[in-house]
Image: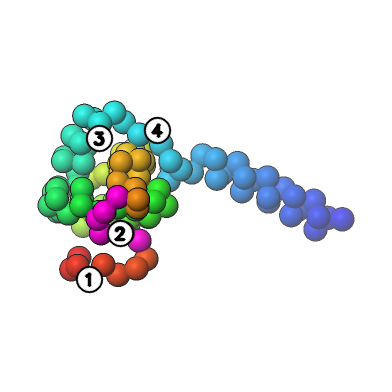
Amino acid sequence: MRASVARALVGLALMGCASQHPHAAATPPDDQQAVALIERRCTTCHAADRIYGSVGTLDDWQALVHRMAYHHKAKLIAHLSDQEASQIAGWLAAHLKPDRTGVHIGFQPTGRPL
């Protein structure tokens, strides 16, 4: 009985954490704000044509953008908040979907150097 109650409490706690997770999809900014944010944060290291020439799902973009944010914080290059990362990923996912032509990001290697 105690184990069942403990599992239920842990499950409820995890559900509450998931809904407030900083990597949850944020509402994408409008186009002008998104482009300005991408230009300010992402083009510090990446060419704009490389960014806009890529396609991916929301999960792909979230994983990629948050991985970049983590590495940049460690290197102190371009500070990217979790909210900005979520906004960028949401906008890129909405505008650069896999149904377009482009290099698909994700777990499959693209053959391009990092």
Q: CA distance from mark 4 to mark 2?
A: 23 Å
The answer to which of marks 4 and 2 sits earlier in the sequence is 4
Q: CA distance from mark 3 to mark 1?
A: 27 Å
Q: Evaluate whether residue 71 shows in this view.
A: no
What residue sits 80% from the left and 51% below the top?
Answer: 5
| Amino acid type shown at disc 1 | Gly
The answer to which of marks 4 and 1 sits earlier in the sequence is 4
Q: CA distance from mark 3 to mark 4?
A: 11 Å
How far from the left and from the top, in percent, is residue 105? 31, 59
The answer to which of marks 3 and 2 sits earlier in the sequence is 3
What quarter of the picture does the N terminus occupy? bottom right
* For discs 4 and 2, the disc positioned in front in the rendered view: 2
Query: Label 3: which residue?
Result: 34
| Amino acid type shown at disc 2 | His
Tell me whether the residue at label 3 lies in contact with that at label 4, contact meaning CB atoms closer than 8 angstroms.
no
The disc at residue 111 is 1
Tell me whether the residue at label 4 lies in contact with that at label 2, contact meaning CB atoms closer than 8 angstroms.
no
| Amino acid type shown at disc 3 | Ala
Query: Label 2: which residue?
Result: 104
The answer to which of marks 3 and 1 sits earlier in the sequence is 3
Query: Chief secondary structure of the magenta span?
Result: loop
The disc at residue 29 is none
Q: CA distance from mark 1 to mark 2?
A: 11 Å
Query: Label 4: which residue?
Result: 27
- Tell me which segment is drawn in magenta: 100-106
* Mark 2 surroundings within 10 Å by alpha-carbon count, few (fewer than 14), some (14 through 19), many (20 or more): many
Assign a secondary structure to mark 3: helix
